[in-house]
Amino acid sequence: MLTTPSDTEIVMMREFDAPPELVWKAWTTPELVSRWWPGKRGTMRTCEIDLRVGGRWRYVMEAGEGGYEVAFHGEYREIVEAEKLVNTEVFEGAPPEAGAALNTNTFEALEGGRTRLTMVTAVDSIQVRDMIIGTGMETGAQEGLDIIDEIVAELTADGRASAAR
């Protein structure tokens, strides 16, 4: 569910039936990001992750039947493994005045081995916030989060299978 707690923030939350370590793994491992980030809207072409403070990331997907590219990039600002990831995000097709968003993703451990992922996107103006919302980003994000649900279920099953051996 998307909320707008201020004129310059977008917040989405999602709970997963898996511990933060597995959600983090799905969120930060290039092979797994390539599965969920495009949602059901395309195919990942580039997934570069240099997961260190000051490291850069870049995701490019080929979307739709026309095969147009959708690309984002940014820099990691704060990394607390399986707890918090802060990064900038720039949509490469946005006008320059849109600037970079600042994303703060927190992975909160819940009872029962569950995780609450809170994604806060902060931008410079209400116009940019509303432009981002107007792109249909919530639907795309929900598709990706649904796929993360599938990935962490697979990772959980793999862990149970390994433990049983």
Image: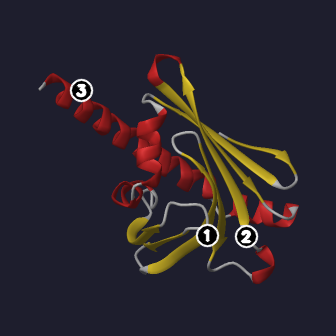
- Label 2–label 1 contact, CB within 8 A: yes
Judged from the image, the secondary structure of the residue bearing numbered disc 1 is strand
> Residue 74: horizontal and vertical position, in percent?
61, 69
Q: Residue furthest top?
A: 112
Name the amino acid, label 2. Answer: Ala
Q: Choose the circle earlier in sequence order: 2 or 3.
A: 2
The quarter of the displayed image where residue 134 is located: bottom right
Q: Where 89 sits versus 115, above or below?
A: below
Say few, some or many: other residues with alpha carbon within 10 Å of mark 3 (under 14 / 14 to 19 / 20 or more).
Answer: few
Q: Choose the circle earlier in sequence order: 1 or 3.
A: 1
Numbered circles on residues, count? 3
Give the CA distance from mark 2 to mark 3.
Answer: 41 Å
Q: Residue at x 36, y 54 (%)?
A: 32
Residue annotated with mark 2: 100
Judged from the image, the secondary structure of the residue bearing numbered disc 2 is loop
Q: Residue at x 55, y 52 (%)?
A: 141
